[in-house]
Image (cartoon, rainbow, N blue to C red):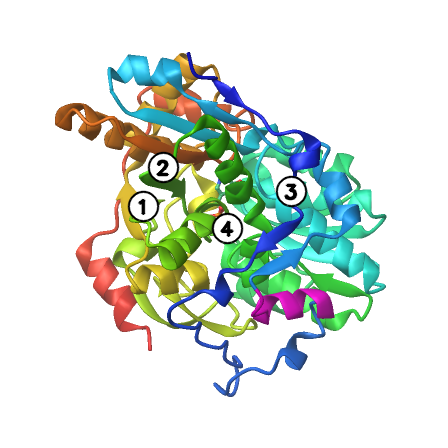
Amino acid sequence: MEDVRILLSEQELPTHWYNVQADLPNPLQPPLNPRTGEIMAPDELKKIFPEALLQQEMASEPDIEIPDEVRELYRLWRPSPLVRARRLEKALDTPARIYYKYEGVSPAGSHKLNTAIPQAYYNKQAGIKRLATETGAGQWGTALAMAASFFGLECTVYMVKVSYRQKPYRRSLMQIFGAEVYASPTDKTESGRAVLARDPDSPGSLGIAISEAVEDAVQHPDTNYSLGSVLNHVVLHQTIIGLEAQKQLEKAGHYPDTVIACSGGGSNFCGLALPFVRDKIRAGKRTRILAVEPTACPSLTKGKFTYDFGDEAHLTPRMMMYTLGSDFVPPGIHAGGLRYHGASPIESQLLHDGLIEAKAYGQLAVFEAAVLFARAEGIVPAPESSHAIRAAVDEALAAREAGEARTILFNLSGHGFLDLSAYDAYLAGELQDSGLDDATLQELLAKLP
Ligand SMILES: *Cc1c(COP(=O)(O)O)cnc(C)c1O
């Protein structure tokens, strides 16, 4: 009988992150200055990011050492378990092996702490006193508040107003860790005041909250900005997930033919997938690597690969990515962490080059898979993560049809204990699928350069 939980000792925690920029067949397109459209010099971002993170953003070496203090904090919950979902396999009557990497064991409840800790560390090293950030559903704000408190930094979180009202427990968590939390748009920034002047009842959006946090950081010399996804250094820190998973699968004696993760900005997807992308590029492996997004915000499957802004007020650099446009406000689906108009430039380039694939699901199919998974494996998954579960279930069913003993690996990026109201709505039959109709999509894409 094969093991169900495949564990690594703390001594086996990876010593380096993996930087895919060293191996990309086509290099990334550089970010552009939002005002001039010229290629952005890294120096222009020094007002909001520490030198060490800017270096990682542009790094060309494949392996980047994880600082000892960061590894020490990772050991609070890492290495995280890799689990063979035997009961799910049985429920699906599939010959496929299904493995999931469980990032919900982090004290913040998701993978986001993997980057929050090094971001707080490098900012502390640089003499910064306070971090400003945005949060949608509250997962990123929670992780950064926790990491900031570990390093004695202050933390200001601009939380999208609808979530601030709907998710009071996320706000409590951030406040326990000492963060100041504001419902965005606020009247504390020019970007926020401009939105309120247009629409006093604005529910806010991630794009607006990013604008507020960036403005706060630009205007205060002792304050830097932190982003929870999308950027190259964030993706780099998350590769700890895939590097551990590779060691664990090796112990189990298997190599996956399919690797799956959900995708909002792309950080947990890249975190799991990039070490397997490395094996495709360097060793000719033929692994299928699948990013899964909601039909309500289909940037990878329906967006355009072009230069776009990261935020609503156009304060951030323009990045080359799959995007639906920086003023797109997706419908209020329950997977709040997947409601971002764009995608990581690294993930976008890989999709463009055919090294990965993307697929979208509506939320009803996603919650159906989430409940199936919870009943089989005993873990209530985050609605975001459940997009990956849906795709893994469909792959396992296809393996059953074909009679193939495949190996499927997916990332369970977080638990859903603070998303129970979403489950309530699903169980009461009150959830609806929302897609993006063709006319709206064409309108959005026409506005892009
Ligand atoms: C934030 C979040 C996501 C989406 O963000 P990515 O950067 O795409 O990983 C997915 N799952 C969970 C649990 C999250 O908190």
Q: Main secondary structure of the magenta part?
A: helix
What range is drawn magenta here? 51-61
Q: Earlier in the sequence, mark 3 or mark 1?
A: 3
Query: Visible in this render: residue 182?
Result: no
Residue 127 screen position, x and y as percent: 85, 63
Amino acid type at image mark 2: Pro
Neighbours of disc 3 within 10 Å: few (<14), some (14-19), many (20+) = many
As measured in the structure, the alpha-carbon distance from the residue carrying label 3 to the one carrying label 1 is 28 Å
Rendered-image quadrant of the C terminus: bottom left
**Which quadrant holds residue 424?**
top left
Residue that numbered label 2 is attached to: 256
262 in relation to 313, above or below? above
| Mark 4 and mark 1: Cα distance apart in space | 19 Å
**What is the crowding at mark 2: few (fewer than 14 residues within 10 Å), some, or many (at least 20)?**
many
- Residue 208, position in %: x, y? 54, 60
User: Based on the displayed image, in which of its 4 quarters is residue 306 positioned?
Assistant: bottom left
